[in-house]
Image: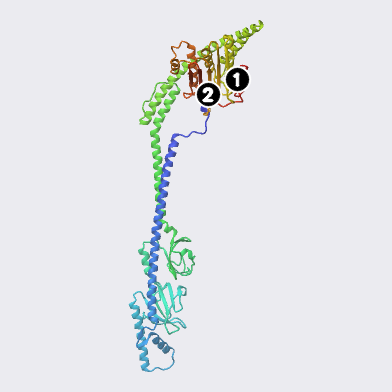
Amino acid sequence: MNNPRQKKTGAPVSIKKHFSLFLFLNCTATLLLIGTVSCITIYTIHENTTQATILGALDTICMTMSNTYDSLDNTAKQLAYEDLVVSSHTISDSLRRYLDFLGSQSEYSDQEKLELVSSKNYLHSSVHFIASVNPNVGLALFYRAVPEKTILFSSASALSGTLQVPEDSYIQDYGLARFHGLHASVLSPFSPVISVERRVSGLEDVYVYVEAGAGWFRTLLENSHIGGDPVFLMTDSQATVIFSTHPEQIPPGTQFQAASLGGGKASFGNYFLFSSARDDYHVAMAIPKWEYNKEITAWFGHFLLIVLFSLILTVSLAILMWRSLYHPIHILHREFQLMAANSPVPVNMGTGIKEFNELLEEFHDARYRVFLLMQQMTEQKTQQMRLEIDKLRMQINPHFIHNTLNSIQWMARLHQEPEIEQMATLFSRILKYNLEGEDIFASLQEELLAIQSYIDLQKIRYQFALEASFQIDEGLGQVKLPRFILQPLVENAIFHGMNRGRGSIQIRAARTEENCLTLQVIDSGPGIPPDKLRKIAEENLKSEEHTGFGLGLKYVNSTIRFYYGEEYHLTIDSTQDAGTTVSLLLPCSPVCQESPWKGADYDQSLTC
């Protein structure tokens, strides 16, 4: 016999490793869950807050820039159209006379020269006046486009020469008017401005130019609390950069995709691009990705430190808890070793932990019960050996009876005594079935063959005029049932159901709808009196005169209940002067093979 302890499915894992692993997984899962939720929340808040701040600042810049463009355009219209009269002449008339004077080779009278000087002074005064009443206007001037942009009159008295405005700063050209994006001021190359040009009404090559300082966009960016040093950009309607606060990083002329300037966040190389759009231009802000993610990166670093600290704390707690559990486990291990040595006396009575103390007490009780059980098993083994010897001794008697019956059978055949020979044969067959079967269960077919032999033996012995019939449903011959379960019922039917040596017995076997087997032994005798039937039902048979009758029924009923349970039982139905029916309800086991019983009446011609 193989030792079951040798059957191993794999290398065992210690409680320490299990405990540490589970504690580590629990801590890790908790940190991952909290960390994931926190990361998503922090990242969402960071994204929403930062984007809202940046886009809000850009929208404010766009709105301020649009208002400034409107103010500059209104100023240019006031200077370009013939609605302002200077010294009884319009501005265009005064400019035309002044240009004629500059290009003429003829002589002017003193009066004409005086009028020309007066008109020129009024033109200077008009430019100063209009520029002063519009606070957004930083500079206003007239220039002549051909042959170069020659400055004629300016609000800045010291300004002269030609007008230098970058050609790539146009954001829109309407023919009569041009709008410039951010570019260097005419007065100072270090001051960004926006400007508007408009042709003077009635003159083909004379234009008015007005500009306004745009330093406010830096103030708005500073007030929006955007960290780092972002690159502020302005593009034309084709998404081409016309102005950059850091041209060394993103130079003018850089072309963006139109989709990247859709008003939200877009990626552009190593930058995140935010923009606010108008019909004619876009303002945008490019922030380095590392700068934009600096807060998130810092938070991740802090979170990793927390995770590392938590893991160290978890490992430390696991070590401390394992040390607190190791001592009780060691005590239990020693108690198991003592149990293996078959020692009934406990050594350790406490572990210091309540649950382990309760477990140790239960183990001591169980160990003591096992010790007693082992003593009982030793005694039972000794008793079993005695029973085996007694059983061998008892088996000698049936063997001797069989040999004696065979001798009687041969002597009856030798002396030509057929009845004695038949009785010996039938009795030997019954004895063999009841005493020499190796299995407590037999098939219904084997039980009925033994019953047939028993009936034939009783008919020869007592000279009964007995009629016996069998009604067996098809397919029930191989159903298993306990041996010697029908013979006590048939014996009662013969001895208590015969009227003056005459009578009939029916044995029926049928399958019920609940897949159970019903066996019935029916006799045609006088029946059982009601008071005796009541005593039988109550199993109060101690005072019966015919002891064999009560013992047979009790044996059959006890056997059925023992093997099949309380729901299977024996019942007796009897009517005075009309016979008795004894019924058995058994479970119907599967049929092993086709049975010889075909449902027809079975007569006494059946032999083994």
Depth check: give the residue in front, 246 or 553: 553
Q: Are marks 2 and 1 in contact (CB under 8 Å)?
A: no
What is the quadrant of the N terminus in the image? top right
Residue at image coords 35%, 82%: 126
Q: Nearer the viewer, mark 2 or mark 1?
A: 1
What is the quadrant of the C terminus in the image? top right
In this rendering, does residue 607 appear at all? no
User: Which amino acid lies under the numbered mark 2 shown in the image of this protein?
Assistant: Thr
Give the residue at the far front of this rendering.
Answer: 577
Q: How many marks?
A: 2
Residue at image coords 39%, 42%: 313
Depth check: give the residue in front, 32 or 418: 418
Name the residue carrying label 2. 518
Q: Would you place residue 219 above or below residue 162 in this image?
A: above
Residue at image coords 57%, 14%: 466
User: Which amino acid lies under the numbered mark 1 shown in the image of this protein?
Assistant: Tyr
Determine whether the residue tagged by mark 2 lies in a helix, strand or loop.
strand
Name the residue carrying label 1. 602
Which mark, residue 232? none
**Image quarter of residue 477:** top right
